[in-house]
Amino acid sequence: MTNLAPSKLAMVPFVSVDNMMKIVHSVGPAAMIRGIADYIEADFKRWPEFDKTPRVAAHSEEGVIELMPTSDGETYGFKYVNGHPANMARGFQTVTAFGLLARVDNGYPVLLSEMTILTALRTAATSAVAAKHLAPKGAKTMAMIGNGAQCEFQALAFQEVIGIKTVRLYDIDPAATAKAARNLAETGLEVIACKTAEDAVAGADIITTCTADKQYATILTDNMVGSGQHINAIGGDCPGKTELHRDILLRSDIFVEYPPQTRIEGEIQQLDEDHPVTELWEVMTGRAQGRTSDRQITLFDSVGFATEDFSALRYVRDQLERTGAYVDLDMLADPDDPRDLFGMVQRAR
């Protein structure tokens, strides 16, 4: 991690939305996704070092608010994130987030950051990291079912990390597809707007599903998935929300981040609790196999896990000194005598 100057130890660097965008443009969107992907993979490879717990969720009829904590023994991190599918119709973001890193040895925070943009970057980076180990070799075409806020980030990630050349777009809202096509027009990708989900997945090596409605949905039916494809299922991320027909799961080799969380929130909530799955970190460290044949259907049942946010926050912190894209927040009471907090308050008169 970047070591900020000692004179700033009492201050906490804060990365606002504006400064996050400055970092993205300073690094470059695709390069930043690759950089975050490298941090995510490095942290997955030291998986046993992390404290792990399913996210702490407060569910309501409108959506969910969650805390996602973890620590590697040296640094602690958490993310606050919401998911409110009805927000879009009301003019709000479906997902918003912020995150924090802190030192374990004294508990002092060392970074506070927006994470609405950063979560989109890290989700795309995680998808690409998984696909690096699970997608068919030489994959060049991806179908993107659901063309909302995450769509373009996913396309860039798969272009940068996997080398896809073509993205086939489909959304029930044609305006969302048109938006995504406009935004991807200068990326060098061949962008094809499709009229049906079936048309989008035809001939695709990789299928990414990313829809927002909180319901047991069937975005992909069993007949839409052929042998050899890799499915990147990232939309089903809470209880009662799925995207894939159960029969697809039964035909696939399933890979997950953290089973105790995924069995509650992911596509595999449709399956028996003892249905076998493989943890992604085991594939990355060589403890388990990923793709083993050209005909195998691989499924990354991704719900997002705290270590990925930890990785993304570490990456951002390491960009601060070079970019200067942060402001210092006076968050820490710092009396001359640690025992005399009241005296510090009195002297402030």
Image (spheres, rainbow, N blue to C red):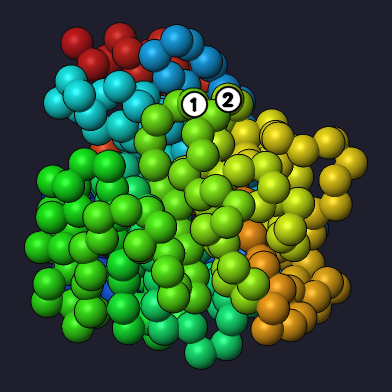
Image height of 270 relative to 297, above or below: above
Q: Nearer the viewer, residue 11 or 203?
A: 203
Q: Are marks 2 and 1 in contact (CB under 8 Å)?
A: yes
Q: Position of residue 17 (x, y in %)?
A: 20, 45
Residue 308 sits in quarter: bottom right
Residue at 85% x, 52% y: name it. 276
Q: What numbered label is drawn on residue 206?
A: none
Q: Where's residue 327, x and y in %?
A: 21, 48
Dot 1: few (<14), some (14–19), or many (≥20) neighbours within 10 Å?
Answer: some
What amino acid does circle 2 point to?
Answer: Gly
Q: SS for tag 2?
A: loop
Residue marked by disc 2: 240
Looking at this rendering, what residue extends furthest in the bottom direction?
Answer: 138
Q: Residue furthest right?
A: 274
Which residue is labeled 1 in the image?
A: 215
Residue at position x 35%, y 27% from top?
Answer: 85
Residue under the image location 80 percent in, 75 percent down: 289
| Residue 220 in the image: above or below residue 65 | below
Q: Amino acid at mark 1?
A: Gln
- Disc 2 or 1, which lies upstream in sequence? 1
Residue 20 lies, in percent from the top left, at 23, 54
Quadrant showing the C terminus: top left
Residue sitting farthest toward the front:
223
Left or right of 241: which side holds 189? left
Q: Quadrant of residue 21?
A: bottom left
Residue 301 x, y percent position in the rendering: 62, 51
Name the foreground residue: 70 vs 3: 70
Mark 1: secondary structure = loop
Visible residue check, residue 298: yes
